[in-house]
Image (cartoon, coloured by chain):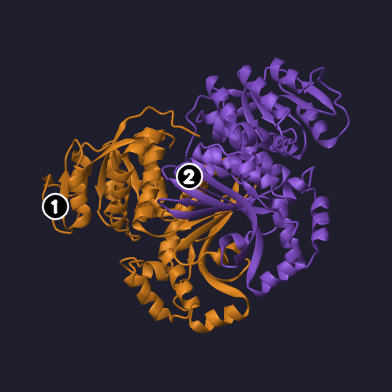
Chain colours: A purple, B orange
């Protein structure tokens, strides 16, 4: 069994945003406090939480369990440990050692998350982001600022929700050269396509996805492939250390797919999937998102519902595929925990 | 990108056995010497190679490229740097820091590999084993001896050939509690079943597997599930720190499956797979190997040819599956490299 040989220290966590992912993370951290300490020498306190509508809570020694439970079970303004700070001030002024950025993703200018990250690095705090904006739009700048301050900039939660893709790449595939990847990177569109396979119309499936809370605030982010586009940009940076502009990733969503297409594919023993692909040749990236009609024997054709999957093309192992959850508060919360454990081991740069 | 912060030092490697896996490993090490140094601060020399029929080669400063090429391209006795040592003596007397144990797997008493491992630990050398014997039959003893001497006992190459399963579990799933697993763990039987799906008789498929070099020296190891049984025992130790005797793993092979069964399954939209499963309840392991008729929608039903796959049932992520190669010299050689890099990082216990 591998063990962490890094020096144990206590991580003081500040959360920007308190939606389903932050709540999932808190649930895990609270339930696993003892095993995380025993098995991973990981100790923490959540010292601050800042939200747009409910205010900011802060306690330098850590918010109490009852405060965190209150946070999870209510959506009224905070009543204990209230602090007159916005997120910026919380990042700057609190004693947090690591900021978990979980505000809404903005793929136009990445704000306010981008400013949050800059402030965190300026004040020597690590960033773990579940927000795709900073990594998709400003990876190089972020990584540069982080390095300069000896800080981490970790993004596991931005790619395949909870499925530990970046960790898999950095740890389990080490030593391989990757020439490309193909994946089902968006759980919501995959859910919609799977519902349509089961007979739903596009509109009904979309409605169902909304009811279940799978849709982004702006549904177009999922449906039209912007979410997958951002994920590909992040993968390009993480896997290849190469920058690609979002606009340089060809993008086609699923809104033109109808029951006629679904039926036609079925007759051909095929299935529609929104496929994100990326390949690298001579340090140049070619990336695109588009619906593809896959043979049922294609492993990605069997990735149904909100599952996600990614196939890495490697020089030593050929294709290696990882399949796992593509949505969910606890699942995505786990990705943040995974980054916290990476931080704890001190193996980042 | 993650980087290794451990202190760089040169690993002096001794190989026990020089079959396809050792040759695959050497090919990778020689081709990637520069990138392994640059990207992973990993430096090495292969100082010794011992075989049963060709003798032992040794040079304390490292065997030359031409010697290693000679090794790979000939099966005549060694001509350069010949040393009058058997494997035991090589392990004891050479200046190796790590012994890569790649002699033939013996699931009766694990010899001679077991003695090789004991000698290595006694003389303070790490063991990386591609031989399933020591880990399947004597994991606790091996791990105990290794710990006592501050040595590693690493077994990535024993489970899913090149697919980095243990590394995935230890690194990418860290923090999860695993309640069980299901997998296609034997590439050869999976190849035979896939050939039978394509119309071959059992005998023809078996013959084909032999021609392609997929069968173990004793075909029964594959066909009757002994290989998968050993892999499950290793997984029980690695994942759950629990010991299970091989005899306590229920085992049924594929030799009773005929074209009649294959056809019957096809009519039901199903497919036969040799499934290894393991679950843990109250620290008690239940493990078995048996052919199962899977619905085509089951992700494991789509794992064809010599591919392997394993699905981990986790508390935070639900099911997470990894799929990759289950055979091949370079592929399995990669698993040894993966362990060498783990050793280099110093994160083992």
- Is B91 above or below relative to B252? above
Residue lying at the far top of the rendered structure: A93
Q: What residue is drawn where x is 63% and y is 37%?
A: A136
Residue drawn 64% across the image and 41% down it: A246
Left or right: A166 as drawn, with respect to B6: right
Residue ID at (76%, 49%): A214
How far separated are the C-alphas under marks 1 and 2? 35 Å
- Specify the label residue B78 is tagged with: 1
Residue B325 seen in the current view:
yes
B339, above or below A254, in the image: above
Q: Is A148 situated above or below A178?
A: above
Provide the secondary structure element on which disc 1 rests: loop
Give the class, few, some or many, for how many residues have Cα within 10 Å of label 2's Cα (few <14, many ≥20): many
Q: Position of residue B48 (x, y in %)?
A: 21, 44
Tag 1–tag 2 contact (CB < 8 Å): no
Chain letter of disc 2 in the image: A
Quadrant location of residue B98?
A: top left
User: x, y (%) of residue B80?
Assistant: 11, 47
- Per the image, the residue denoted by label 2 is A172
- Per the image, label 2 sits on a secondary structure element best described as helix
Frontmost residue, B150 versus A55: A55
Crowding near pointer 1: few (<14 within 10 Å), some, many (20+)?
many
User: Chain for mark 1?
Assistant: B
Across and down, in percent, residue A89 comes to: 74, 18
- All told, the count of numbered labels is 2
Question: Quick one: B234 or A115, which is closer to the camera?
Answer: A115
Q: Quadrant of the C terminus of chain B?
A: top left
In this view, A142 is above or below A158: above
Residue B55 at x, y percent in the picture: 15, 52
In the image, A60 versus B137, the foreground residue is A60
Q: Are marks 1 and 2 on the same chain?
A: no
């Amino acid at each position: 069994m591998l063990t962490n040989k890094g020096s144990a220290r206590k991580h003081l966590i500040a959360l920007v945003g308190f939606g389903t992912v932050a709540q999932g993370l808190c649930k895990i951290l609270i339930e696993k406090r003892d095993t995380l300490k025993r098995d991973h020498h990981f100790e923490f306190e959540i010292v601050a939480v800042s939200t747009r509508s409910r205010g900011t809570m802060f306690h330098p020694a850590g918010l109490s369990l009852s405060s965190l439970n209150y946070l999870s079970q209510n959506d009224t303004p905070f009543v204990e440990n209230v602090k007159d700070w916005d997120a910026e001030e919380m990042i700057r002024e609190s004693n947090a050692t690591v900021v978990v950025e979980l505000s809404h993703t903005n793929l136009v200018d990445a704000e306010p998350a981008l400013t949050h990250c800059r402030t965190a690095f300026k004040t020597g705090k690590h960033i773990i982001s579940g927000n795709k904006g900073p990594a998709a739009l400003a990876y190089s700048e972020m990584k540069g600022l982080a390095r300069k301050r000896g800080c981490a900039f970790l993004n596991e939660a931005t790619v395949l929700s909870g499925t530990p893709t970046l960790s898999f790449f950095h740890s389990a595939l080490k030593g391989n050269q990757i020439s490309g990847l193909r994946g089902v990177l968006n759980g919501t569109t995959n859910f919609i396509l799977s519902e349509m396979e089961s007979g739903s119309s596009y509109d009904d499936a979309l409605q169902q996805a909304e009811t279940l809370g799978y849709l982004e605030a702006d549904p177009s982010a999922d449906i039209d492939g912007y979410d997958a586009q951002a994920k590909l940009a992040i993968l390009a940076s993480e896997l290849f250390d190469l920058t690609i502009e979002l606009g340089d990733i060809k993008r086609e969503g699923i809104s033109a797919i109808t029951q006629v297409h679904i039926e036609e594919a079925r007759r051909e023993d095929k299935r529609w999937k929104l496929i994100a692909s990326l390949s690298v040749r001579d340090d140049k990236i070619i990336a695109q998102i588009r619906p593809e009609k896959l043979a049922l024997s294609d492993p990605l054709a069997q990735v149904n519902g909100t599952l996600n999957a990614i196939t890495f093309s490697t020089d030593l192992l050929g294709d290696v595929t990882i399949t796992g959850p593509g949505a969910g508060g606890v699942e995505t919360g786990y990705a943040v925990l995974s980054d916290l454990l990476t931080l704890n081991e001190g193996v980042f740069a």
